[in-house]
Amino acid sequence: MKSNSNKKYLIYSLVLAFIIWYFATMQVDPLVESSIYVPIVLKNTTDLSGKAYDTDEPLVAHVSYYVRTSKAEDMAAVNMSAYVDFRELPMEGEDNDNKPAVSANDSIPLKVNIEDNSNLDNIYIYNISPKYLHVRIDDYASKEFPITYISQGTLGRGYTLGDVTLMNDTALISGSKRDIDSIDKVAIVVDLADKSASWTGTAPIKYYNEEGEELNSLNVTSSVSNVGYIASLNVAQEVKIVQYYTGTPQDGFGVKSVKITPETINAIYSVAGFNTGKTIVLPIIDISGVSESVHRKVDITGLIDSSTKLVDNIKTVDVEIEIVTSDQLDDGQAAGQRSNIIILPRATRSEADN
């Protein structure tokens, strides 16, 4: 009996000693509360063969813990991370070879990993936020898209954007089929602000849906990330239209006026080809022996080079050489008849081509 009593007292003594040691330790080296942001690592993603996954949540977790006061400063050097294991996704069935289920939306619990095991006795993790990572799993797809451009910004008065040549014509986009199907256009943004001459640049590709809205959160990769381009500027200019004539009317008649409708047109030229005083010279009209006004509808499209664009899409002009009897001419017009009779061998060509 005495031996049993001694054992009982020994056990009581050890428990009491532990309690005293614990409280003494807590007084000497108490626990303090702290927290840290750690990256979320994705494990076993290769098990999703032929599938794509994405999440709208940032891959960062907030870990809250208690740590011994004496070890609190050492926590800055502790290599801690949170992780999710894709093998913990719901399973498709018993004969699925332990592959993750293909579900539109799943939640995987987050766990904390501390690589330095010597710190495990000094840290007590009591919370991690978020507790689950929400992921989407979809079929993997690839599609080739043409690359175009969108202009942004305002040019100075009189300038318009000319040709834009892209260094890459297409891009192969790969990723979640759901995201691939949502893309309607792949484009770069060409910034026009403060431009007054042709320029070169580079811009990242962006994705847009059918409504023209930019898609910023796609789980896709591209064979091309940045596209170089060459852009030119055009300048708008008012161009005068000129009509010359040759020959003299029938005796007793003269030229009272030459009317051109419209007298000017608005055209667009490259900045490099811009110069002041541009004119379009219409083909010469021979008025030899006429006694009535001459009317012509002249097609000007052949008088303009291919690099010139007409703003108002005017293709023809109306010309009237007004012929009247001599007594209807004033002295100045009568005296000026011969000065208006000219011969221009090259007048059928437009000076706007120069």
Image: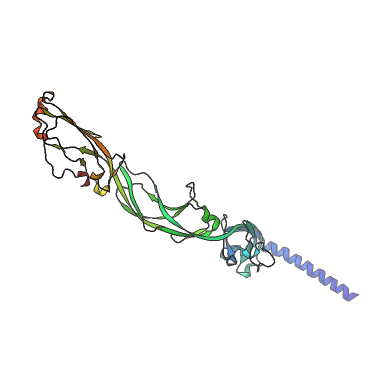
Quarter-of-image position of residue 45: bottom right
- State left or right for residue 130 relative to residue 175: right
Q: In which quadrant will I find the N terminus?
A: bottom right
* Left or right, 83 with reference to 308: right
Q: Position of residue 241 (x, y in %)?
A: 22, 38
Residue found at the far bottom of this picture:
3
Tell me residue 104's x, y (percent).
Answer: 61, 56
Q: Residue at x 69, y 61 (%)?
A: 27
The correct choice, above or below, for 104 with respect to 310 in the image is below
Rendered residue at 36%/44% (across/down): 154
* Residue 112 x %, y %: 63, 63
Residue 27 appears in the figure: yes
Q: Nearer the viewer, residue 24 or 241?
A: 241
Q: Is residue 277 visible?
A: no
Colour scheme = rainbow
Q: Residue at x 11, y 36 (%)?
A: 247
Judge by depth and name the residue closer to the eye, 67 or 212.
212
Residue 225 drawn above or below residue 257: below
Quadrant assignment, res 16: bottom right
